[in-house]
Image (cartoon, rainbow, N blue to C red):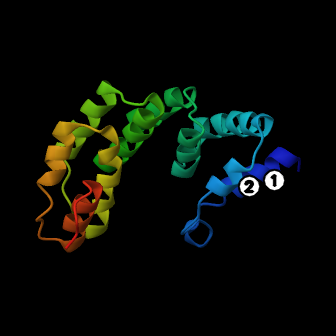
């Protein structure tokens, strides 16, 4: 195993709760030199072609990999779940520093979204990344939601006090 393989294993641990709960690779990425960052980005670009792992995508967002957006759009188009489509659109929007097409996708998908479980309310943190008035207006509709966590996450995403 070469150095880049070892580095990738540290940056993208196995997709288990034990390995990823509370995990951040920020400290690893900030410790890399430009050559290592370029090698990591190249490897992650290869990986995302076949693996729709959100941690790979999030890391490519941190690395501002414009090249990754083409692969992310493929994952977006394969997705059928509104939450998954919003997630991929948010990654693309972050890299492009705004994208009206992705904002429109997120807006449409969220209009069709129905909360089945309170934990799904973390979707607000993806939606807020679009910095869109009309999406923020949709989020505001949930600040008094009957599910506590839905209300809490809507308020927090909007930066409101959660009294």
**Residue under label 1:** 6
Residue furthest right in the image: 2
Q: Is residue 23 above or below residue 96?
A: below
Q: Residue at x 44, y 28 (%)?
A: 96
Q: Which dot marks residue 124?
A: none
Viewer-proximal residue, 26 or 88?
26
* Quarter containing the C terminus: bottom left
Q: Residue at x 72, y 38 (%)?
A: 37
Q: In the structure shown, which secondary structural element does the residue marked by tag 2 occupy?
A: helix
User: Residue at image x 11%, y 54%?
Assistant: 141
Where in the figure is residue 129, as x and y percent of width and height?
Answer: 35, 43
CB contact under 8 Å: marks 2 and 1: yes
Q: Is residue 42 left or right of residue 77?
A: right
In the drawing, what numbered circle is on residue 9? Answer: 2
Q: Nearer the viewer, residue 113 or 99?
A: 99
Residue 117 visible somewhere in the drawing: no
Q: Residue 17's x, y, as percent?
A: 55, 70
Please, what secondary structure does the residue beneath circle 1 have? Answer: helix
Residue, x 29% and y 39% (percent of image)?
Answer: 131
Residue 46 showing in the rendered view: yes
Q: Residues within 10 Å of mark 2 (few under 14, many from 20)?
A: few
């Amino acid at each position: 195993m070469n150095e880049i393989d070892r580095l990738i294993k540290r940056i993208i641990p196995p997709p288990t709760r034990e390995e990823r709960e509370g995990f951040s690779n920020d400290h690893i990425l900030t410790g890399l030199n430009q050559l290592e960052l370029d090698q990591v980005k190249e490897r992650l670009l290869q990986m995302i072609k076949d693996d729709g792992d959100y941690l790979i995508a999030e890391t490519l967002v941190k690395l501002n990999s414009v090249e990754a957006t083409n692969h992310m759009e493929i994952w977006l188009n394969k997705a059928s779940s509104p939450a998954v489509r919003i997630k991929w659109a948010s990654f693309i929007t972050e890299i492009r520093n705004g994208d009206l097409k992705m904002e429109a996708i997120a807006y449409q998908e969220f209009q069709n979204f129905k909360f089945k479980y309170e934990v799904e309310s973390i979707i607000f943190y993806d939606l807020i990344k679009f910095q869109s008035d009309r999406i923020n207006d949709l989020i505001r509709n949930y600040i008094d939601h009957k599910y506590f966590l839905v209300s809490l996450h809507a308020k927090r995403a909007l930066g409101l006090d959660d009294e």
